[in-house]
Amino acid sequence: MFLTIGETVDRQSVRFGEAPIEPDEPVGLGEAAAARLWLAAQGCR
């Protein structure tokens, strides 16, 4: 689920003050932030 979120965030070119998240690379702590922003973008549905 989170891997899919990481890919979605990468496709939307969302940046966290650093380099854009690559779906091929491990996200680590950035994944949690990506998930929160992704859920916010989806309207928390």
Image (tube, rainbow, N blue to C red):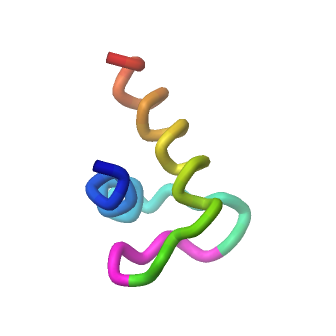
Which of 17/4 is in front? Answer: 4
Which of 44/15 is in front? Answer: 44
Residue at the (61%, 76%) spot, across then down: 19
Give the vertical position of 15 relative to 27 (above or below).
Answer: above
Counting from the top left corner in percent of width and height, residue 42 is at 35, 27
Residue at the (34%, 82%) spot, across then down: 24
Counting from the top left corner in percent of width and height, residue 2 is at 36, 52
User: Does the segment drawn in magenta span residue 22?
Assistant: yes
Counting from the top left corner in percent of width and height, residue 26 is at 47, 77
Residue at the (38%, 59%) spot, across then down: 6
Residue at the (44%, 61%) spot, across then down: 13
Quarter of the picture containing the C terminus is: top left
Predominant SS of the magenta segment: loop
* Highlighted range, magenta: 19-24
In screen coordinates, is 25 left or right of 36? Answer: left
Counting from the top left corner in percent of width and height, residue 32 is at 57, 49
User: Does the segment drawn in magenta span residue 35?
Assistant: no
Q: Residue furthest bottom?
A: 25
Give the vertical position of 39 relative to 21 (above or below).
Answer: above
In screen coordinates, is 45 left or right of 13? Answer: left
Q: Residue furthest right?
A: 17
